[in-house]
Image (tube, rainbow, N blue to C red):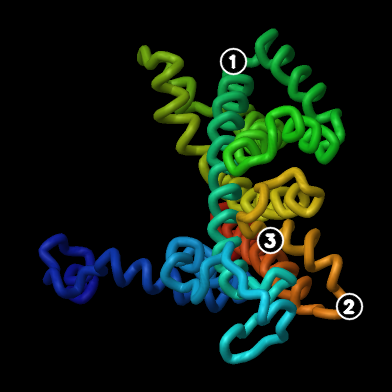
Amino acid sequence: MSAVLDVVTPNAPISSRRSPRAGWAGWLRSFVARKPLGAIGGALVLLLLVVAAAAPVLAPYPYDVGNAAVRLQGPSLAHPFGTDANGRDMLSRIIWGAQISVTVGFGAVLISTVLAVTVGIVSGYFGGWLDLTVQRLVDIWISFPALVLLISLVAVAGPGLWSVTAILGILLAPGTSRVVRSAVIGIRHLPYIESASCIGAGHSRVLLKYILPNVLAPIIVLATVQLGTAILAESTLSFLGYGVPPPHPAWGGMLSGTGRAFMLQSPWLSIWPGLAISLAVFGFNMLGDALRDELDPRLRGSR
């Protein structure tokens, strides 16, 4: 009996209490053990962010300055990833390309998430004619072929980093808004929501204090998965010539230019950009799947 009292007493020594750092470390170890693919994906995402942030320091050469004397040179100590047809270092261009991919990916997902959460929460909470009207507009927006609509809008707005980011964010929002709306509909009639309304809480307070925190889990998972989708879409646009214009080193543009022209003669021109795109998309997808399992109580299983 005394042992039980010692455990539950509030006057237990501070040293015996669990610190937040120890809690995070324990959760991280458990996450790595239970979700190894998710941990690998998280490591790839972290590596991508570090490379993008430290590109000016990590890149051994400027991405837009070439040396004709070493054009189409294979991997060597001076150029570990080889050089392209203009004598530019491929490793430096891959590193700087990570910065473009991260900027477009996170910018597009930020725009998409803000739009989708706003539309989905308002539509699902109020319902009625507002929900009907908004969802029909979403149906019309989704019915257009995504790639055709994306190319058309970029062609009208003009290729560029920020135009591609904004258009991708707008195009990714409708699908996410559907998921957010479904989550809101599932909780809007729960007792604690109705109790908040009964005691006088306004619509804005209910939406921000009670609805939004309880639908954050699917929003976070969708945002993580959409990061890979946005990077892949930006690479597709750059490959087709509608993405970030040269001399900026977009990974898709590397595949389309000298990478396609000299694929057989110099295969490293296609291998490294393609591998970078694949690892980035794989990392975000695996991390998103693992976060979905962690944040959804129905998928956690017993501890």
Residue at 75%, 47% (x, y): give it: 237
Q: Residues within 10 Å of mark 2 (few under 14, many from 20)?
A: few
Mark 3 vs mark 2: give the one in front: 2
Q: Could you say whether the residue bearing mark 1 is in a helix, strand or loop?
A: helix
Q: Quadrant of the N terminus?
A: bottom left
Residue at 78%, 18% (x, y): give it: 136
Mark 3 vs mark 1: give the one in front: 3
Please tell me in which quadrant of the rendered image residue 13 appears: bottom left
Measured Cα–Cα span from mark 1 to mark 2: 59 Å
Q: Is residue 266 above or below residue 128?
A: below
Residue at 55%, 63% (x, y): give it: 96
Q: Are marks 3 and 1 in contact (CB under 8 Å)?
A: no
Give the numbered dot on residue 251: 3
Q: Could you say whether the residue bearing mark 2 is in a helix, strand or loop?
A: loop
Mark 1 vs mark 2: give the one in front: 2
Give the numbered dot on residue 126: 1
